[in-house]
Image (cartoon, grey):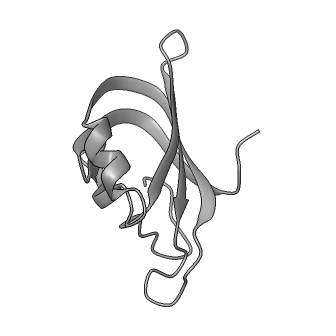
Amino acid sequence: MRKQQKREIELHDAQLVNLQVDYHKSEITVDVLYYRDPINDQIRVPATLTFRKVTSFSHIADLKQLKTNRAAGDVSNWWSDVDGKTYIYLAGGCMIVEAKSAKFQEGTRS
């Protein structure tokens, strides 16, 4: 993400929980369950990716494939900042968000 993180955040094998797009505010929130330490942790914890001042958003998802792969995780790879864009590659699809601001916050969103 664009903000300096205290630690590397890895979303490989994260599960998607919710996606919310507020077209009027140009904001997107993505709720996930992820492993803090993908090598040693066995329990996923909740987190939220919040994008503000979104200028473009693309999303394609094969919901049947995501459901089939749910236990292993929906996210196969992510790149948090490539020229202002976040790429989230899914087991069955892809999400690309271009935004002026991106924030990762652990815990459930209010």
Which quadrant is the C terminus positioned in? top right
Q: Position of residue 9 (x, y in %)?
A: 46, 69
Q: Position of residue 82 (x, y in %)?
A: 24, 51
State the residue lying farthest toward the top.
Answer: 24
Q: 91 or 37, which lies in front?
A: 91
Residue 72, picture quadrant: bottom left
Q: Is 49 above or below relative to 7? A: above
> As drawn, is 28 to the left or to the right of 78?
right
Q: 85 or 41, which lies in front?
A: 41
State the residue lying farthest toward the bottom.
Answer: 40
> As drawn, is 50 to the left or to the right of 39?
right
Q: Is residue 46 visible in this depiction of the protein? A: yes
Which residue is pictured at 41% across the width and 26% down the height? 54
Which residue is pictured at 27% across the width and 50% down the height? 90
> As drawn, is 89 to the left or to the right of 75?
left
Q: Is residue 80 visible in this depiction of the protein? A: no
Q: Is 59 above or below relative to 50? A: above
Which quadrant is the N terminus positioned in? bottom left
Give the mark count.
0
Which residue is pictured at 39% across the width and 62% down the height? 73
Q: Position of residue 44 (x, y in %)?
A: 57, 69
State the residue lying farthest toward the right.
Answer: 110
Q: 95 or 99, which lies in front?
A: 95
Q: Is 11 above or below relative to 39? A: above
Which residue is pictured at 56% across the width and 74% down the height? 6
Q: Position of residue 13 (x, y in %)?
A: 38, 66
